[in-house]
Image (cartoon, rainbow, N blue to C red):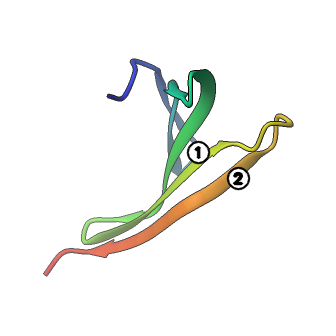
Amino acid sequence: MRAAGHCALDGDTFVNDYEEVIDGKRTKMQDLWTDITPNSHTLTESHDAGNGVMKPYVVSHNTRQ
């Protein structure tokens, strides 16, 4: 279950920062929506790799049909 977080527009990027519990440990997570157009966007989901650096684990490019 995704926890409540902080959402903001940073220039042309929509950012959603939140935390989830993974293997009993609170982990920082982040969703970034980039390359936003009326018909497409890119979503990058990242998590803290354990050293404070956000590591992408899913990148999806979506286009409206």
Q: Residue at x 59, y 45 (%)?
A: 11
**Side of 29 where 50 appears, left or right:** right
Instruction: Tell me where residue 12 appears, x and y as whole percent.
Output: 53, 51
- Tell me the amino acid under the disc marked 2: Lys
Which quadrant would residue 51 be assigned to in this image? Answer: top right
Residue 57: percent from left, percent from top:
58, 59
Q: Earlier in the sequence, mark 1 or mark 2?
A: 1
Q: Amino acid at mark 1?
A: Gly
Q: Classify mark 1: helix, strand or loop.
A: loop
Q: Mark 1 against mark 2, which lies toward the viewer?
A: 2
Q: Which residue is mark 1?
A: 11
For the residues bearing labels 1 and 2, Cβ distance under 8 angstroms: no
Instruction: Tell me how many marks there are.
Output: 2
- Side (left or right) of 32 relative to 55: left
Q: Position of residue 7 (x, y in %)?
A: 46, 27
**Residue 30 is drawn in which quadrant?**
top right
Q: From the image, tell me which residue sits under label 2.
A: 55
User: On screen, 27 above or below 32?
Assistant: above
Nearest to the observer: residue 24 or residue 53: 24
Write the residue at 82% across / 34% down. Answer: 52
Q: Residues within 10 Å of mark 1 (few under 14, many from 20)?
A: few
Could you give the CA–CA distance between mark 1 and mark 2, rounded to whole angstroms?
A: 21 Å
Secondary structure, mark 2, is: strand
Residue 18, percent across and down? 51, 26
- For residue 49, the mark is none
Q: Identify the residue at the far left of this view.
A: 65
Give the residue at x 62% y 28%: 27
Q: Quadrant of the N terminus?
A: top left
Residue 15 position (above or below residue 57)? above
Q: Quadrant of the C terminus?
A: bottom left
Q: In the current view of this chain or complex, which residue is farthest to the bottom?
A: 65
Toward the front, the furthest residue is 23
